[in-house]
Image (cartoon, helix red, strand yellow):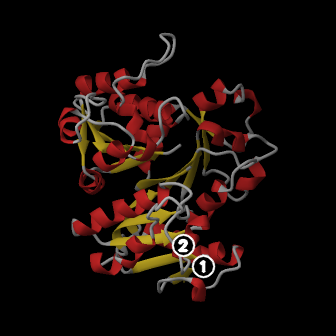
Amino acid sequence: MQEPHDDGDLLVILRHGPHGSSWLKEGLDAALVAAAFGRRVSLLFMGEGVTALIADQQVGALGQKGTAATLEMLEMYDIETLLVEAQGLSRLGLSRDDLMLEVECLSPVALARVLSGHRLVLTF
Amino acid sequence: MLLHIVNRSPATSRVYLQALAGMSPEDRLLLIEDGVQGALPQLVPYYAGLEGRLFALREDLASRGLLGHCDASVQVVDVDGFVILTEEAERTVSWY
Amino acid sequence: MRYAILLMGAPYSDQASHSALRFARALVARGHRLEAVFFYHDGVHNAARLAAPPQDEPHLVDAWASLSSKHQVALQVCIAAALRRGLLDEREAARHGKDGVSVKAPFELTGLGQLVDLGTHCDRLVTFGP
């Protein structure tokens, strides 16, 4: 059965939090460039990646920028589909009220459907 | 149908849970690198429900001395088989 | 089919680079066209021209270069990820006032737009992570 790809051109799956590694930053960079090239981009925050969205993040002790400022720019790049693995949030005892952006929470079934719905999936 | 690729052992990493969460009922899963540990009879229950859709890379099993230890429910493929799996899938998703 | 590979693991630190190279060789042996290998995250270290592994180990940097010349595979290295990690070609070394060059052809420093482009026009993009 052929799955339709009508959800978007690129799904970027972000599975790491801010500051601990460069995965989140480099994943967001790929998303921003794709959006700047006119691709329809969705972000899926999964597992530890949900911590990227926690409100009140600060720069690191050495002035490392982190990623919160980049997340605030997503709307400017027309990246409006922000998806979060519901289990990723609940596992950390977090709710949508703890997050800095409006997101859509995905059940396990919806999550698999999102992967099938994009023409390209990149995991970071 | 998507091909999911996992390179971590379910005994030591939660990455397999992310792969399973991302899989649709017709998707396939290929175990490579340290991921081939998931083909051992003791660990293959982590992938319950994937019978007929679970594959492991022969050369990564062989280099680890695990070729003879693979569960019968896992389909062992060589690197050509890996390429064929990517041909047959619409696209691939890697979990690492 | 037209393929691209995205490699994000550093050579010799984990198996990702070996896996990607094996897969790349198998692809072209089956008659597929491998358009490019895109090196991102720690994968950019695959372009380090000064890598000097022991002679009885696979030389990954040379192996990529040989694959590139035999099968016209572009070796594209994310410039932002590379500069941060000390991987500079002649032009970037001059621009940043450095007296050494750590990347040379057939590896080319390029932008993430190339990755987006590969993802769009290739039939398959396969990622190898650490």
Specify whether disc 2 shares its chain with disc 1: yes
Residue type, numbered disc 1: Ser
Question: In the image, what residue type sits under mark 2?
Answer: Leu
For image coordinates 36% across by 47% down, the residue present is C81
Write down the chain letter for disc 1. A
Taking the spot 61% from the left edge, 61% from the top edge, the residue there is B18
Rate crowding at label 1 as few (under 14), some (14 to 19) or many (20 or more) other CA atoms within 10 Å.
few
Q: Is residue C45 left or right of residue B71?
A: left
Whether pointer 2 and pointer 1 mark residues with C-beta atoms closer than 8 Å, the reply is: yes
Q: In which quarter of the image is residue A74?
A: bottom left
Residue A50 in the image, given as x and y percentages of width and height: 57, 72
Mark 1 element type:
loop
Q: Position of residue B80 (x, y in %)?
A: 46, 32
Residue A56 at x, y percent in the picture: 54, 80
Within 10 Å of disc 2 (Cα), the crowding (few <14, some 14-19, many 20+) is many
Left or right, C91 with respect to B64, comes to: left
* Residue underneath mark 1: A107
- Residue B1 appears in the rendering: no
- Taking the image as drawn, is residue B96 in sight? yes
**Label number found at residue A111:** 2
| Disc 2 secondary structure class | helix
- Which image quarter holds the N terminus of chain C? top left
Identify which residue, C6 or A1, lies in the foreground: C6
Q: What is the tally of numbered marks visible in this picture? A: 2
Q: Seen from this angle, which residue lies furthest top? A: C55
